[in-house]
Image (cartoon, helix red, strand yellow):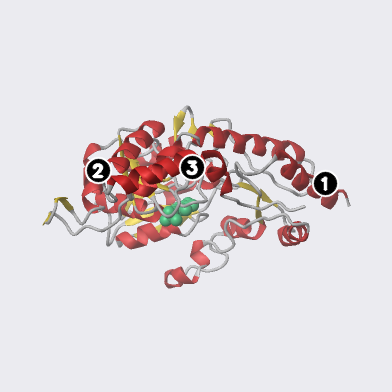
């Protein structure tokens, strides 16, 4: 028995002809940067998310960084971020020159706790950057209400949330702007790096368009000091093919999550994902928790079942942020999660038989 945590072969198996055709189309067009494919993908992904604008960029980290720049956020400003997230959320803020201000998660959802945001706001705060962690939306109504009251921007880190629902709307359409990643392992993944910004704000969209391309609209006429962060034609062409399958693939993830939630509910001490009734997760990850996480992980490993930890080191305890002076004990909820979370095999590649093997192994481990 062997169940891999992640296997990206499914896209090739299911879409080989269309992906090959996309490759040929781009090669024959002779246009590789900012051409028709990127334009078409931007329109299609904007429509998928339910927003007016989408701008393709180099990766998810850049998407978040460019949004902050376009909002005029930088040196001397503060941005509220989840303490419990992938470090890219914090790095985007650091790149802009602003300071990430961490806030603890809600213990049940693992997403930023809206009730603690108010206390973290200072005169320097310019934005809140919630993350839809593991593919489940943060409590956006509460976050947007606080932001509105205090005159802040809300920037979604939607890197794990392609197609995730919140009260009938989709991630990417729930704040002022959102950053997506198309890293291969994400729910919508390219065959390399890629990212996008979505927004309903036309002015913001124009600014992001400008700064992703050297700050120039007209070649060699540079209005601002921009960056080079563009989604390329080949990735856009592949993403257009895969976008058509996203809902079906997310549907398979949902079935897998449902089976786990049902089959593992009686394992002693195992905390399963909590889904509020307003959330429709896209199940980027299925993250369970247990005090004996490491022993369980080692046991599964021996049986050929791949698991991962998202994330073992919270950003505030990483070497990269040693300069903040933050230390162990400062964010106990986040630190507790880092010690107990375990991501089970999840994705469109998991066959029912494979999932049955995983569930069977849990049964044996918890029966004894
Ligand atoms: C993947 C990810 C990013 C960064 O995306 P890249 O495309 O790898 O730069 C940012 N935030 C979160 C929460 C992510 O999971």
The numbered mark, 1 or 3, whose residue comes first in the sequence reads: 3
**Which quarter of the figure has residue 257?**
top right
| Image coords of residue 134 (percent x, y) | 55, 46
Q: According to the image, label 3 marks what residue?
A: 161
Q: Within 8 Å: ligand 1 and the Cβ of disc 2?
A: no
Is there CB contact under 8 Å for labels 2 and 3?
no
Of all residues, the one furthest to the left in this rendering is 221
| Image coords of residue 240 (percent x, y) | 40, 39
Q: According to the image, label 1 marks what residue?
A: 363
The numbered mark at residue 204 is 2
Q: Within 8 Å: ligand 1 and the Cβ of disc 3?
A: no
The numbered mark, 2 or 1, whose residue comes first in the sequence reads: 2
Question: In the rendered view, does 14 fall on the left or right side of 320?
Answer: right
Whole-angstrom CA distance, mark 1 to mark 3, is: 30 Å
Q: Secondary structure at mark 2?
A: helix
Q: Residues within 10 Å of mark 3 (few under 14, many from 20)?
A: many
């Amino acid at each position: 028995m062997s169940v891999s945590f992640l296997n990206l072969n499914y896209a090739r198996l299911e879409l080989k002809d269309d992906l090959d055709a996309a490759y040929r189309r781009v090669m024959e067009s002779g246009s590789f940067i900012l051409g028709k494919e990127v334009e078409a993908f931007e329109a299609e992904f904007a429509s998928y998310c339910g927003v007016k604008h989408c701008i393709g960029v180099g990766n998810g980290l850049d998407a978040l960084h460019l949004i902050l720049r376009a909002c005029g956020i930088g040196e001397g400003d503060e941005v509220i971020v989840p303490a419990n997230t992938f470090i890219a959320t914090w790095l985007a803020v650091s790149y802009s020159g602003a300071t990430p201000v961490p806030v603890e998660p809600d213990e049940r959802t693992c997403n930023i706790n809206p009730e603690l945001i108010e206390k973290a706001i200072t005169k320097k705060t310019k934005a809140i950057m919630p993350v839809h962690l593991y593919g489940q939306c943060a409590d956006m109504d509460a976050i947007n209400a606080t932001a509105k009251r205090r005159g802040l921007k809300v920037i979604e880190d939607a890197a794990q949330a392609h197609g995730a629902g919140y009260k009938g709307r989709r991630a990417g359409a729930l704040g002022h702007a959102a950053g997506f990643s198309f890293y291969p392992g994400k729910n919508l993944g390219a065959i390399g790096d890629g990212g996008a910004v979505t927004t309903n704000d036309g002015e913001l969209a124009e600014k992001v368009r400008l700064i992703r391309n050297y700050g120039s609209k007209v070649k060699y006429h540079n209005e601002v000091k921009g960056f080079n962060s563009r989604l390329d034609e080949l990735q856009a062409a592949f993403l257009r093919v895969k976008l058509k399958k996203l809902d079906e693939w997310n549907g398979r993830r949902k079935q897998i999550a449902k089976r786990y939630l049902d089959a593992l509910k009686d394992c002693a001490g195992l905390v399963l994902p909590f889904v509020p009734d307003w959330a429709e997760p896209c199940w980027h990850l299925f993250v369970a928790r247990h005090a004996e996480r490491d022993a369980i992980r080692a046991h599964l490993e021996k049986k050929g079942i791949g698991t991962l930890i998202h994330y073992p080191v919270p950003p505030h305890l990483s070497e990269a942020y040693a300069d903040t002076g933050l230390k162990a004990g400062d964010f106990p909820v986040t630190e507790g999660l880092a010690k107990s979370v375990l991501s089970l095999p999840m994705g469109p590649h998991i066959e029912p038989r494979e999932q049955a093997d995983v569930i069977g192994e849990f049964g044996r481990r918890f029966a004894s």
